[in-house]
């Protein structure tokens, strides 16, 4: 990661363990030793600095999302707002930042009506996978398989294109 001068793997661990989306909500005097996430050498880094990096990248993503919404005349006009699922939804403050930048209601989408042996299935990281499984199960009963594949394939392509546009 450029901002921390570390590998992508270490940066991901920093994000998961210490990340927050809104820099002003983080204590400026809190320091993180990157050795705690596997870095071989490091100087202490302020958690606020990490949050500033994360906030900047998250705002870039929201700008791209808003661009897409503007292209279909829906910027700021989704009554149900934005629902965050998956591992990225665990990033602290992401819903608050989205409310501010997208001018839409924002919430975290937890799996519903899931009975499991373990509580891990109720983790935000699994929401997307569980939702796709449940959605696929309902489609299995109602639609021909070719139609399902085309819709899913087109959706995946659009998501990939969005993320490719965010890469340097």
Image (cartoon, rainbow, N blue to C red):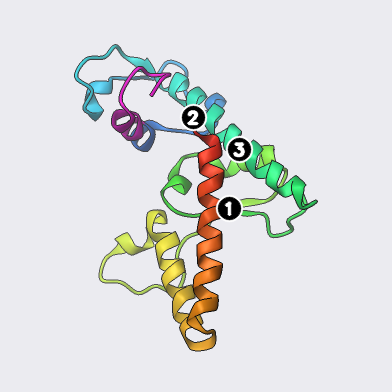
Q: Secondary structure at mark 3?
A: helix
Check disc 3: other Cα within 10 Å, few if <14, some if 14-19, many if 20+.
some
Looking at this view, is 136 or 79 the one in front? 136
Q: Earlier in the sequence, mark 2 or mark 1?
A: 2
Left or right of 62 on screen, residue 67: right
SS under mark 2: helix
Observer-nearest of 151 and 125? 151
State whether residue 25 is above or below residue 118.
above
Q: Which residue is mark 3?
A: 97
Q: CA distance from mark 3 to mark 2?
A: 11 Å
- Marks 2 and 1, how far apart in space? 19 Å
Q: Which residues are magenta?
A: 1-14
Quick check: marks 2 and 1 in contact, CB under 8 Å?
Answer: no
Residue 36 image offset from top left, x and y in percent: 23, 26
Mark number displayed over residue 119: none
Image depth: mark 2 or mark 1 in front:
2
Circle 1 sits on which residue? 107
């Amino acid at each position: 990661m450029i901002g921390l001068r570390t590998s992508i793997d270490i940066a991901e661990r920093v994000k998961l363990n210490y990340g927050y989306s809104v820099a002003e909500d983080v204590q400026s005097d809190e320091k993180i030793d990157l050795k705690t996430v596997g870095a071989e050498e490091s100087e202490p880094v302020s958690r606020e600095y990490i949050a500033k990096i994360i906030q900047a990248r998250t705002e870039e993503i929201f700008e791209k999302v808003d661009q897409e919404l503007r292209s279909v005349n829906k910027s700021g006009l989704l009554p149900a707002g934005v629902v965050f699922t998956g591992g990225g939804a665990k990033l602290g403050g992401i819903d608050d930042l989205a409310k501010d930048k997208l001018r839409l209601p924002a919430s975290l989408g937890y799996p519903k009506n899931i009975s499991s042996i373990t509580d891990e299935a109720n983790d935000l990281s699994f929401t997307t996978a569980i939702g796709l499984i449940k959605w696929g199960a309902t489609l299995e009963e109602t639609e021909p398989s070719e139609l399902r594949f085309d819709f899913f394939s087109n959706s995946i392509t659009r998501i990939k294109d969005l993320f490719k546009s965010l890469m340097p």
